[in-house]
Image: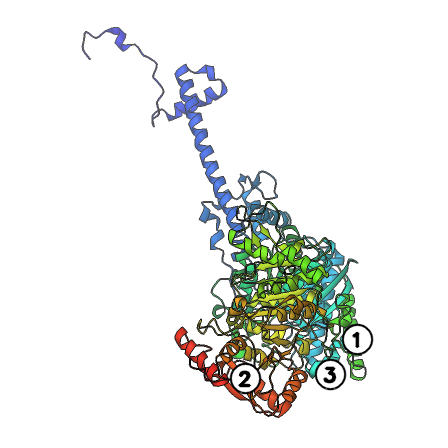
Amino acid sequence: MPSNANKSDLTPTTIGPSINAWNATFLDALFTQWKADSSSVSSEWQDFFKGFELGSSLENQEEESKAQSCVDSLIYNYRMEGHYAADLDPLGLHDPIRTRLLPESFGLCKGQFDTMFDPGHLDLPKPSTLRTIIERLEETYCKHIGVEYSHIEHREQRRWLQANMEPIANRPSFDNETKSRILRKLTEATTLENFCSTRYIGKKRFSLEGSESLIPMMNELINEAGEHGVEVVTIGMAHRGRINVLVNILRKSYDQLFTEFEESWIEDFAGGGGDVKYHLGYSADILTDLDKPMHITLAPNPSHLEFGHSVVLGKARSRQRTQCDKDRLLCIPLLIHGDASFPGQGIVAEMFNMAHLDGYTVGGTVHIVVNNQIGFTTNPQDSYSGRYCTDIAKMSGAPIIHVNGNDPEACVHAIQLGVQYRQTFHNDVVIDVWTYRKHGHNESDEPRYTQPRMYQAVSKMQPITDQYASELIAENVLSKDVHEQMVEDVRNELEASQERSKTQPISSSVPPYQQSTTWEGLRGDTRNREVDTTVSKEILSKIAHALGTVPDNFQVHPKLKKLLETRKNIITNNIPFDWGIGELLSYGTLLEEGSPVRLTGQDVERGTFSHRHAVLIDTKTSEPLICLNNISQEQAKLCVHNSPLTETACLGFEYGYSLGDPHMLVVWEAQFGDFVNGAQVIIDQFISSAEVKWRRSSGLVMLLPHGYEGQGPEHSSARLERFLTLCADRNMAVINPTTPAQMFHALRRQIKWPFRKPLVVMSPKSLLRHPKAVSTISDLTDHNFQPVIDETIESNTFKRVIFCSGKIYYDLAAHRETTANPESIALIRIEELYPFPKVELLKIVLKYTETEYIWAQEEPENMGAWRYIDAAFRDTFSIELTRVCRRPSASPAVASNNMHKTEQNRILIEAVGLPVTK
């Protein structure tokens, strides 16, 4: 240091705040002093400590916020993906996936388990420890119930599900009465299966063993539904467990069941048909366990899995209409599926697609999937591509509740939750019950050939009933003696009923017109088919006026104004009318007489060929208008709905609708008749055969546009030959009408008949606007339907009689006029092909003797009515017809319009003769 340094430079000064390893101890002491008394340190240190504490506080807050965000994410993930970790498989063959729910995956560690966090919407104290939050989420979403609901679009529904699951951790506290009731239904189910397995060895019954929880589930669904004001439950299910459901849910008597097992009587079915016991339906009026009246019906079902469910939905919709149930709260459809058919059959997707459509909604369906994890011999990985067999249900926004079928109380909670959700939100709900199948596909099938590992696990399973009984005994709900007596009582009843059935058989198949007030006034006898379908000119004029009248403020498309004017004055001015008007007049007359009409199909509101215009659209507001709903105050209602682009589920739905209300005219129209084969299962298994199998009558009308007009193989044929092949036992009517009046009377006849039969109509395309294909008012006021229309030309020189059906008549008539001797050719139209009109045709045959008989059709030889007509004429009249038609073909029609014309001309020349050369 310089010798001349100023003394003042050596005077000590206060050191500003700083931190280093040398003064850490000093700093801690000073900080403690500041905390005790901030004024005890200098202002510089006061500022320093204030800043230090603020920074530390913000850092802690940031850490806490980050941790809370991690907890929020964990809660969210449990709700969205907790089902992956749920214990669902009773056999333990599927390991839960827990990797999505590990706390460390969300930045949380075990050291934070006792840290307090906000549980959000979880019904827990605020705050709660992370441990408590996880425990609640585990109990709710990862035990014996797993729920998928993140795909639901509406937050209100997601919040409702959370509020009804999380507070009770998906485990309600059932009272002893409910638990005893669950055990009782399990006991009934198990005892029945055990009894049948020993008394009817080798007989197919498609046992429910391994899935017995279905019975208490269905029973509690009915109880819960009754508490929510439901009056009707319509059920559809396949064969697995059906016998058990019939007896233990619908309360079909043991005597009736064993009569079918013993085959101790011959059922008086129409035509002697019938069906196997595990396909039959049943209906019953019962009191629920909670004393609420309930009508339960189980629809008959073929072996074609899932197809009957569309029928059940249609019947439910019909029931809702007859109950005036606009909110759709009084009738619940319950559909029970298998885990292989649910994703495998395309009709399931069709039904979910229809769930929210105005013309098809039923206000929500409860679906139960009996998921025994196998389809006959096919494993799940070969049955569907998704993780769950229920993935297809997400398309309609339905919550999917997966549940372990070995936990009866969890199953009951799931179904109660499902009913409550359905009644609240009018949406579908799916309960996926994971079970197992004790035997093979049927009782004589050996499953160990193809599923050895699964059946090794099955062999170790304790019966569900025994397991649950042990639990209730341990809980002191009941004693072992009480349960043993419960089993003994059921078995004694089974023993007595089996003995009675051998000597006192009981028929369980009752036709609808004998068991339902809905069918009052109808009968099964179809011999008298003569009914009056004429309508007065005054009524027709009233309907025509309504058809052509719209409100003053309704903006009609300019091109339709002339059509409306024509409709309005068609009767008054006695103008010949076309098919569109004839059809609408028939609907209008039925509506005025009090019979409602339902018309559905692709594009039916306007009509595929722009001929109907049953629904008008305001060109400014797009509001629809159905003129036929404005005839009078007392009239019934016309319902017209364009359908989605599908045939199978829609036709099944309409068939079901016709079963529910026989007094409503139900009409389904194919866009082209060629497309009806997309619904072949519905035609074969239901429409054509349900009456002889199950005694179920239907008055459904099918309009199938048919006719060869050069539009190619996919727009020509409704496959008339297939329908005629299905005809027997007077099971339906098949017509090929040639005038609007014939259509008018045929549609009215469906309601006027004192019985119900399906009507298949080969409806027209080019005839819709054919100048000759018209009718007059007198055809409606003075005549009825004519099964056969005789030649209208008066002549004594007929040399050739040509029988035909449908559109070709007009081609033959026009060509006849070009020949040298048109008066020598008689054209006879067979309008009703089935039932075969032998009385009317006999008059024709006796009238035209000493002539050549020809059958002319535009279809190929192996199609159309030829083979049916040929056999009928041979068998009935001993007449051999000469056929004129296209050559046999694998395809209905040619693609070339020119070739079509050449073929058509050849038929006309061969049938009628060469035209005169001018």
Give the residue type that dot 1 points to: Asn
Q: Which residue is mark 3?
A: 262
Q: Which residue is mark 2?
A: 866
Closer to the chain start, of discs 3 and 2, is 3
Q: Is residue 188 visible?
A: no
Circle 2 SS class: helix
Mark-to-mark CA distance, 2 and 1: 61 Å
In front: mark 1 or mark 3?
Answer: 3
Marks 3 & 2, CB-CB < 8 Å contact: no
Percent x, y of residue 54? 44, 26
Q: Residues within 10 Å of mark 1 (few under 14, many from 20)?
A: few
Question: What's the residue at 50%, 49% (across, down)?
Answer: 77
The one of 645 and 491 positioned closer to us in this rendering? 645
Q: Is residue 889 left or right of residue 322?
A: left
Give the residue type that dot 3 points to: Glu
Closer to the chain start, of discs 1 and 3, is 3
Q: Which residue is mark 1?
A: 492
In front: mark 3 or mark 2?
Answer: 2
Which image quadrant: the N terminus?
Answer: top left
Q: Residue furthest front?
A: 918
Q: Residues within 10 Å of mark 2 (few under 14, many from 20)?
A: many
Give the residue type that dot 2 points to: Trp
Q: Which mark is residue 332?
A: none
In front: mark 2 or mark 1?
Answer: 2
Percent x, y of residue 464? 66, 67
